[in-house]
Image (tube, grey):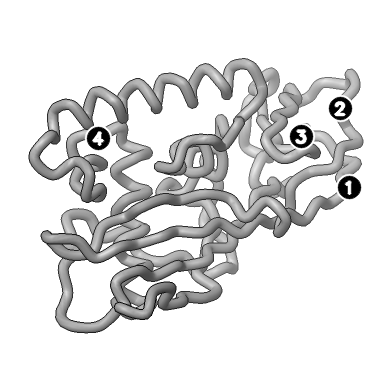
Amino acid sequence: MSVARRLGPWPVLLLLAGLSVSCGGGPPSQTQVGSWLGSYFDAVQSGDHERVATWFEGCVGREEECEGVLAATAASVSAQRELGDYRFDDPEGFGLITAFVLGRGGFWRIVETRVKSEQADEVLAFVEVRTHYTAHETEKLPRGALVEYLVEPLGKVQRIEVGSSGPGALRDEVKTLTMQAAFRKGVRGWRLASFVPVRESVVYEQVIWRPE
């Protein structure tokens, strides 16, 4: 989205860059997973593809190649945004992280962590986000600024100009969405496998106000 939200009443986990993703025996705690996600979100939002690559097991030993692939993915996500249609089809979650401003003030919390495999080497974390704006969060924007809203169906973007009187005041806006982060334990510790939406979890809210 075009405007970073201010921190609100939901718990936002601290963004701790440069954390090691290795840990002792057994699956990581929810606190550890939250710290990893915060660092990953920050790397994505910063466009630091070198740092992003460190989160994926498949990039070990081929970091330079991975960085190029990740940069191309980020460019594709940017193009989707310009067309008003996030497909959310990248397993790295760039589209989700960008759209929901994760790592730059977006609202998120881990609602559950779950050990997936019998070997306890794969953990799923379910992350709930709030995506809609309130009047307070847009009141300081200059007249003519564009505010982007995620609307039904999931992935569609509606742009509304601050202070405009044209169409777009009534919309079914994404209120909450749950994402699934999968972590797997590899040769160098825990790494992110994917960050994807749980599409059936989306909750919409009908909104009738426009930014002024």
Residue at image mark 3: 211
* Residue assigned mark 4: 48
Q: Secondary structure at mark 2?
A: loop
Disc 4: CA contacts within 10 A as few (<14), some (14-19) or many (>=20): some
Q: CA distance from mark 2 to mark 1?
A: 12 Å
What amino acid does circle 1 point to? Gln
Mark in front: 2 vs 3 = 2
**Residue at image point 57% right, 34% down:** 1
Q: Amino acid at mark 4?
A: Asp
Please indicate whether residue 64 sits to the left or right of residue 3 in the image.
Answer: left
Give the mark nearer the N terminus: 4 vs 2. 4
As helix, strand or loop, the secondary structure at mark 4 comes to loop
Q: Earlier in the sequence, mark 2 or mark 3?
A: 2
Marks 2/3: CA–CA distance: 10 Å
Dot 1: what SS?
Answer: strand
Q: What amino acid is at disc 3?
A: Pro
- Position of residue 142 measured from the top left corner of the image (x, y, whole percent): 63, 25
- In the rendering, at what x and y percent does residue 70 appear? 31, 30
Above or below, 128 against 159 in this view is below
Residue 168: mark: 2
Which numbered disc flags the more N-terminal residue, 3 or 1? 1
In this orientation, which residue lies closer to the viewer: 23 or 207?
A: 23
Q: Amino acid at mark 2?
A: Gly
Q: Residue at x 44, y 59 (%)?
A: 181
